[in-house]
Amino acid sequence: MAKFVVFHTLSTPTPISAVEPFAKVVKKYSIPGANWVGSWIQLDERGNATKLCCEWDGKDKDSIKRVLDRVLLEIPGVPTDGIYPLMKVDSEAYR
């Protein structure tokens, strides 16, 4: 299965507690062909989320988009900047 990264830029800085329900719904709708692995959250100086960087395992971009479309029906308002193929490089490979 291929790896993908999905970026979500939030329209306003958002408390982490308000982002958590989105994560729960994403996990609920993940399927074998589009599985959310985890995320990095960019924080502002107050500790509020400004951008989500989400790692996915997926068959293809369309499979991930279908999951995100279902998520947005339940929790609207989280924009998707894009879904991009990802290659993960581990620093241990360069020792």
Image: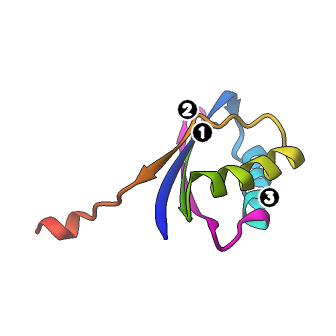
Gap between marks 1 and 3, in whole Å? Answer: 22 Å
- The reply to whether the magenta stretch includes residue 33 is yes
Counting from the top left corner in percent of width and height, residue 13 is at 67, 30
The one of 79 and 92 positioned closer to us in this rendering: 79
Q: Which stretch is magenta?
A: 29-49
Q: Which residue is mark 1?
A: 47
| Image quarter of the C terminus | bottom left
- Number of other residues with Cα within 10 Å of mark 3, as a class: few under 14, some 14 to 19, many 20 or more: some
- The reply to whether the magenta stretch includes residue 53 is no
Counting from the top left corner in percent of width and height, residue 29 is at 78, 63
Identify the disc placed on residue 25. Answer: 3
Secondary element under disc 1, as helix, strand or loop, is: loop
Q: Amino acid at mark 3?
A: Val
Residue 33, compared with residue 53, is above or below; it is below
Residue at the outermost top position: 11
For the residues bearing labels 3 and 2, Cβ distance under 8 angstroms: no
Along the horizontal axis of the image, is 48 left or right of 19? left
Q: Amino acid at mark 2?
A: Asp
Q: Residue at x 79, y 66 (%)?
A: 28
Q: Amino acid at mark 1?
A: Gly
**Which circle's residue, 3 or 2, is located before the other in the chain?**
3
Name the mark nearer the viewer: 1 or 3.
Answer: 3
Specify the color scheme: rainbow
For the residues bearing labels 2 and 1, Cβ distance under 8 angstroms: yes
Residue 74, compared with residue 44, is above or below; it is below
Identify the disc placed on residue 44. Answer: 2
Secondary element under disc 3, as helix, strand or loop, is: helix
Name the mark nearer the viewer: 3 or 2.
Answer: 3
Residue at the outermost right position: 74
- Number of other residues with Cα within 10 Å of mark 1, as a class: few under 14, some 14 to 19, many 20 or more: few
